Amino acid sequence: MIIAIDGPAASGKGTLAIKIAQHYQFAHLDTGLLYRAVAFLLSQKGLDLQDEPQAIAMTHEITEAVLADPHLRGREMGEGASVVAALPGLRAALVDYQRKFATSFPGAVLDGRDIGTVICPDADVKLFVTASLEERSQRRFKELSAKGQSYTYEDILADLKKRDERDSGRSSAPLKAADDAFLIDTTNMTPAEALKMAIRIINSKR
Ligand code: C5P
């Protein structure tokens, strides 16, 4: 069974994907990490984030150790990931890995921006997870403050707004809900409530 989860940054899709995978004992792939890893490897080598051939070359250097590097999860790499993610050649280079992951296990959950539309258009269940920009900014702000990082709420809101525009506006695999995706708006939901709703949807498809 393949479960595709898409949605904008800080919508709760990552947390939901992890909880769904735990609940059903499915494998989980956070596909955003792949783009973050490419941005990270390029910046480590002092290369331009818009350099498509180099970005494609970096996909061969994505190792478990790179994916586990805490720098990947920071604000800067989120920003960098959304820049490299607009390169069509890089997106194409990452397709096979994601599809192979999706079909290598009895059950797999993949979360990202284009899972239901491009990577796994035949997924058994597609969820589009969203929340208001203000709520998402508030969540990200709390998360980063808890880690001791001193960004203001306004910084985060501006960041997410820019990222939403870049992710939705790009020509290659823009962020959008698949026609057959179930919408989960987590603005006024706890993670437990979102999980309950997702489980109800998934169980109806099993
Ligand atoms: O989900 P996360 O915030 O880690 O993703 C970082 C960036 O990677 C996103 O803003 C988006 O530009 C890109 N991305 C993508 N397609 C995916 C996953 C992430 O374009 N499937």
Image (cartoon, rainbow, N blue to C red):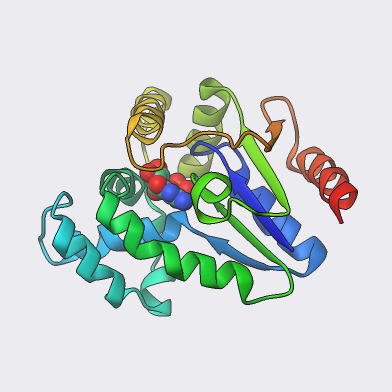
Residue lying farthest to the front in this orientation:
122
Look at the image and tell me in which quarter the C terminus lies: bottom right
52 lies left or right of 146 = left
Q: Position of residue 145 (x, y in %)?
A: 47, 40
The residue lying at 82 percent from left, 50 percent from top is: 202
Q: Position of residue 97 (x, y in %)?
A: 45, 70
Q: Is residue 136 visible?
A: yes
The residue lying at 54 percent from left, 30 percent from top is: 136
Q: Is residue 71 visible?
A: no
Q: Position of residue 54 (x, y in %)?
A: 15, 64
- With respect to residue 167, does 78 lie above or below? below
Q: Nearer the viewer, residue 153 or 164?
A: 164
The residue lying at 39 percent from left, 25 percent from top is: 161
Q: Looking at the image, how many numbered discs can be counted on the residues?
A: 0
The residue lying at 23 percent from left, 64 percent from top is: 56
- With respect to residue 83, does 189 lie above or below? above
Q: Position of residue 17 (x, y in %)?
A: 66, 54
- With respect to residue 1, does 64 lie above or below? below
106 lies left or right of 79 = right
Q: Nearer the viewer, residue 68 or 138?
A: 68
The image quadrant that residue 60 belongs to is bottom left
Look at the image and tell me in which quarter the N terminus lies: bottom right
The image quadrant that residue 47 belongs to is bottom left
